[in-house]
Amino acid sequence: MKIWVPLDSAAKALGADEVAGAIASEAAARGLDVQVIRNGSRGMIWLEPLVEVEQDGVRVGYGPVSAEDVPALLDGKLASLGPVDAIPFYAKQTRLTFARVGVIDPLDLADYEAHGGLAGLRRAIAMSGAEIVKEVTESGLRGRGGAGFPTGIKWNTVLGAEADQKYIVCNADEGDSGTFADRMVMEGDPFSLIEGMAIAGLGVGATRGYVYLRSEYPDAIVVMEEAVRRARAAGVLGTDVLGSGKGFDMEIRVGAGAYVCGEETSLLNSLEGKRGIVRAKPPLPALEGFLGKPTVVNNVLSLATVPVIFEKGAAHYAGFGLGRSKGTMPIQIAGNVKFGGLFETAFGMPLGELVNEVAGGTASGRPVKAVQVGGPLGAYLHPDQFDTPFGYEEFDKAGGLIGHAGVVIFDDSADMLKMARFAMEFCAVESCGKCTPCRIGAVRGVETIDRIAEGDASAIGLLTDLCETMKEGSLCALGGFTPFPVMSALRHFPDDFARQKEAAE
């Protein structure tokens, strides 16, 4: 009997380790031949720990399961959720980047290959660097870390740069609130990231790679380090990648816990052992990046998507999506929500369908008041905007941004003035201090919102001017995007700001 129990951090926080131990102990006591496999999470967090039992070749789900439920599980008396693939939240998805997450044993390279792994790398080995870059360009893949910059253009810049050494750097410093897709990939399908980085290296002529992984992800660090060791032992990494005569190797570097190091130049400074502060651009990292050499800096999701592009072909991947937003996006649903978790779908789904149908509305049962998309720097969208399709240009027209696709839902009890203040306070705390608009502007922003809360309506104009200064004058997205949540809160929920004046009177 095969039983899968997730090793994902979210599942472990909800008792997955205790469930796995209870299954092993109970099976041994009964003399049952049970193989417990630790997989990644399927992304349905409200069902974790989600235990899967193979029955006639079909994986049937049970959840959430506690250690006390194990005897009933082994007796066949525990109520099931039916085939996991048929659970509505999961069945509605289009899984490309996350096709293996929750399905395989993350550290079993043979299991990875049995589910399509390394097919893309083997294809890439037979291609020239220019052909590899062309394939990525034609796929339409854009950076999944926040900016949405075309991946092929970035790779082509590094390919054309003259240097004795080039690097691939994976930005795994996933610090946005309400985001967890990078972590889920690293814990649930680490070889996809390794394979994607190797393909990137072959494409642009880089022989070294680094994963800059946030210290707050201890489980991901352990899994990734072991995956790199196993990949190197199997010849997937090293001086002779899969017997090709071409070299690419990589290692894991752990950050010290600064939000601003999610910005690529701050990350590179930290990676070099320097203080994590923003660099002025130009020069671009693609020309002068890590140690002053041409460097590809991509997000986990971007690099983990590369293998499926090479396995299935650029045209297959580009066949999904909307307009210039090609392929799929792993959307992370969190906040006051009934069905929180990871939902991968092709670009184009209306925000309202995602919030009300997929996520099931609020956990509290109260009306949805606002949805913040794109982390703490993302705009607050009003229910009137729920017809906005999930796409980069479409969100931009609505005054928002997709960012890393974290979707945080708020019900009608939320005070949007307080949420605007939180955005400014967050920026003030996390600013690296390099530029004045961010370092000083955010502090002044908190003070100005406090004036509005005390009934000074004249401060609203000052807040608007301050946000414009931060947006236009900041060196990076931390200061430049903080006005998005502040101004969207003010624009869409003016009553929350006016009520403060009424209360003060």
Image (cartoon, rainbow, N blue to C red):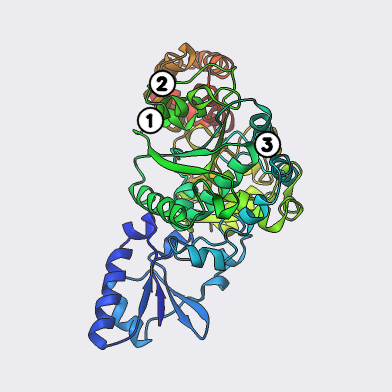
Mark 3 Cα shell of 10 Å, populated few (<14), some (14-19), many (≥20): some
351 and 4: which one is in front? 4
Where is residue 237? Give x, y as percent. Answer: 50, 49
Image quadrant holding the C terminus, namely top left
- Which quadrant would residue 50 be assigned to in this image? bottom left
Viewed as shown, does residue 426 lie left or right of 409?
Answer: left
User: Quick one: label 1 or label 3, which is nearer the N terminus?
Assistant: 3
As drawn, 490 above or below 85: above
Tell me the residue that label 2 is attached to: 432
394 and 299: which one is in front? 299
Where is residue 368? Give x, y as percent. Answer: 53, 48
Mark 3 residue type = Pro
Rounded to the nearest angstrom, the CA distance separating label 3 from label 2 is 27 Å
Mark 2 residue type = Cys
Kindly state the secondary structure of the residue where label 1 is placed. loop
Mark 1 Cα shell of 10 Å, populated few (<14), some (14-19), many (≥20): some
Kindly state the secondary structure of the residue where label 2 is placed. loop
As drawn, 465 above or below 147: above
Q: Closer to us: mark 3 or mark 2?
A: 3
Tell me the residue that label 3 is attached to: 150
Rounded to the nearest angstrom, the CA distance separating label 1 from label 3 is 26 Å
As drawn, 178 above or below 340: above
Kindly state the secondary structure of the residue where label 3 is placed. loop
The tag on residue 12 is none
Residue at the spot x=48%, y=77% of the render?
A: 60
User: Quick one: label 1 or label 2, which is nearer the N terminus?
Assistant: 1
Q: Quick check: marks 3 and 2 in contact, CB under 8 Å?
A: no
Q: Quick check: marks 1 and 3 in contact, CB under 8 Å?
A: no
Tell me the residue that label 1 is attached to: 258
Mark 2 Cα shell of 10 Å, populated few (<14), some (14-19), many (≥20): many
Residue at the spot x=54%, y=22% of the render?
A: 480
Q: Quick check: marks 1 and 2 in contact, CB under 8 Å?
A: yes
